[in-house]
Image: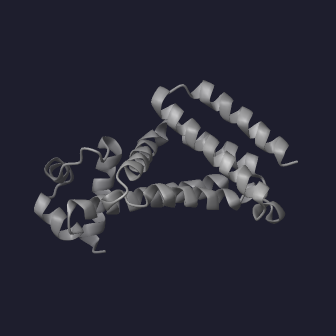
Amino acid sequence: MSARQAELLEAAYRYALANGLVDLSLRPLASAIGSSPRVLLFLFGSKEGLVKALISRARTDELALLGDKSGDEAAEDLPGAVERIWAWLAAEEHRPLLRLWAEAYARSLAEPDGAWAGFAKATVDDWLTVLAGCQAPAERDTAAGVARRTLALAVLRGALLDLLATGDEARVTAAVREATAGVRAASR
């Protein structure tokens, strides 16, 4: 990737965080980031190529942040990792990235081809891999271990969507704590 392409991708990513991807139009985007539609098409091949690059960029942030929040101290502690990840997900300053993630996830399900292709499955795999790293090796590769991290993922994803829809952080956080207590009890 050229320096100019990287610079424009970062600017477009900031724009997408603020404005979303659903109604992305090249003219307003280009104007907002100090470029032109022609340059964006040249550098990214097409609007679909730009959207793919933006989704990839968002996924990179998501993975970095998930890894940071599961943390080394979370090794062999799935419920603790879920609590740390939830605290990060619930923070108001992370809502733009999470809205972008939810938008890309939903579009990937509704439009399985094109720019969105495979995003939903890839992100499920990403999160399950992060959560697996938070389980004891003896549990990680068992059917029960897979079920517990799938439950943890379902709780985090469902809670995230509920939080984005309602903004009711206290209620949703209480539900996550209740579910985490259940995961902790099941792990004993």
For the point 20% across and 50% down, the residue is: 29
Q: Is residue 175 above or below residue 5?
A: above
**Dividing the picture into quarters, in which one does residue 135 lie?**
bottom right
In this rendering, position of residue 174 left or right of residue 184:
left
Where is residue 109? Give x, y as percent: 42, 50
Where is residue 57? Give x, y as percent: 40, 60
Model colouring: one colour
Where is residue 157? Give x, y as percent: 56, 43
Q: Is residue 25 above or below residue 140?
A: above
Residue that extends furthest to the right in the rendered view of this protein: 188
Q: How many marks?
A: 0
For the point 52% across and 32% down, the residue is: 163
Residue that extends furthest to the bottom in the rendered view of this protein: 2
In this rendering, position of residue 107 left or right of residue 67:
left
**Dividing the picture into quarters, in which one does residue 124 lie?**
bottom right
For the point 63% across and 48% down, the residue is: 153
Instruction: Mark yes or no: residue 158 visible.
Output: yes
In this view, the residue in front, 104 or 26, is 104
Q: Is residue 180 above or below residue 116?
A: above
Question: In which quadrant will I find the N terminus?
Answer: bottom left
Instruction: Mark yes or no: residue 36 visible.
Output: no
For the point 46% across and 61% down, the residue is: 60
In this rendering, position of residue 105 left or right of residue 147:
left
Q: Is residue 119 above or below residue 3?
A: above
Where is residue 100? Give x, y as percent: 39, 46
In this view, the residue in front, 125 or 133, is 125
In this rendering, position of residue 148 left or right of residue 113:
right
